Amino acid sequence: MSRGRSYKDPGTVRLRKDSAIPISPRVTVSSAAFRCSSRMVVQFKVFKKAAPNGKLTIYLGRRDFVDHVSAVDPVDGVLVVDPSYLQGRKVFGQLVCSFRYGREEDEVMGLNFQKDLFLASEQIYPPKDVEPTKLQERLIKKLGGTAYPFTFKMPEQAPPSVTIQPGREDEGKPCGVEYYIKVYVGENEDDRSHKRSTIQLNIRRIQFAPSKTGRQPCTIVRKDFMLSPGELELEVTLDKQLYYHGEKIAINVTIKNNSNKTVKKIKAAVQQSVDICLFSGGQFKSTVASVETQEGCPVSPGSALQKCMYLTPVLSSNMDRRGIALDGHLKNIHTNLASSTLMANPENRDMFGMVISYTAKVKLYLGAMGGEVTAELPFVLMHPKPDLRRMMRADSQAQVESFRSESIAASVDMD
């Protein structure tokens, strides 16, 4: 019934600056597949950046590299170079982790609040005998004979990408941890790079939520008072331990008042904790969502109250707050509150990293003389792991996104 039919493909994918990547010129499919041709050709995004002189260009299949706690995705890409320009020189590549722990505007009298860690370095051209990945094979096939693969292995202990949200009046680069790839031309690896023949492209190291969730968080706090025959009991329970960004958090509160005090108000909050490993006392906390209520109050002596309070910690309600930790930011990628940091061994953490954690906090107000009763529960806030089973085929169309190459000193937002 369905005879094969053929049609001609456009032949190229148009890029910025009139560049193009050739694709398969002719594809043959059945009539049923022809009606759903969008299912037959898988489009994948390729990130491209060229040196200011246009003689070097790198292509990456992604800018987000996943930290699986036990292992990290390798940073793989392809370099396109004009051999006539090199004149016997070599091309080197580096993977750099940049940790900024102070404002750029405060760097006076020789102070520097930034540390650059060179995690990997290798010679890309002349090429070495390396086994290309599937993505590199497809890019080399489409880009031609002057394309050469490169791969950097990221250390397992390196920290995830994090950005501390600056204030409105702050200038310069924000504090945090960022990664970038640097490709340059030189006689040797230690040769000084020149701006016109250097490429710098920012990437991110990210973590996704684990497949297995932990036990349901629950805590009970009891407080007795002087000259009181009984005690006040506060029980706080979350419906689960792992939440995804944008998901509503249900906080179940149970109060049993066997004391002579009266509960006048209840407050629930989600608190973000940022631990800067470089400093012994470098931990600070920020409230990213909160709600207060007097519904069901006052809880008089001898009575009880059971209540469920809902909170949704999102960046949109904290846009103007300075010091909030965000996931590493890249151009055209909408960021969010920083994800919880997962570590195989909490004692073995990188000193140039930031550890992010979240707690749900419930506070009972007992009046001026009664004081307060507080309970805290830790939980995990992350992104779900995406479905990576969809593979690119040889006739895939490449959607290429280019980046400016005027400056190698641009920040993440300008990259």
Image: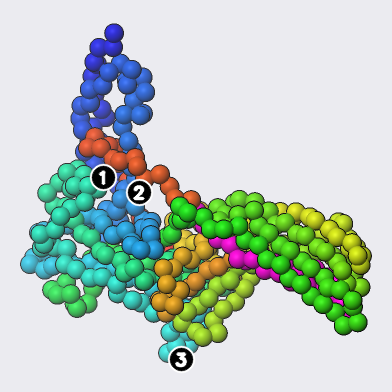
First to last magenta residue range: 359-383
Where is residue 301, by image quadrant?
bottom right
- Dominant secondary structure, magenta: strand
The 10 Å Cα crowd at callout 2, few under 14, some 14 to 19, many 20 or more, is: some
- Residue 22, compared with residue 101, is above or below; it is above
Q: Spot the residue most to the bottom.
A: 109
Residue 109's label in the rendered image is 3
Q: Examine the image and state in which quarter residue 348 appears.
A: bottom left
**Which of the image's four quarters has the C terminus?**
bottom left
The kind of residue on which mark 3 rests is Met
Sequence order check, earlier mark of 3 and 1: 1
Horizontally, is 269 left or right of 106 in the view? right
Q: Which residue is mark 1?
A: 19
Q: Is residue 104 magenta?
A: no
Local secondary structure at mark 2: strand
- Residue at point 59%, 51% (across, down): 246
Q: Are marks 1 and 2 in contact (CB under 8 Å)?
A: no
Residue with the most extreme top position = 1
Spatial separation of the CA atoms under disc 1 and disc 2: 11 Å
Residue that numbered label 2 is attached to? 401
- Disc with the residue nearer the chain's start (1 vs 2): 1
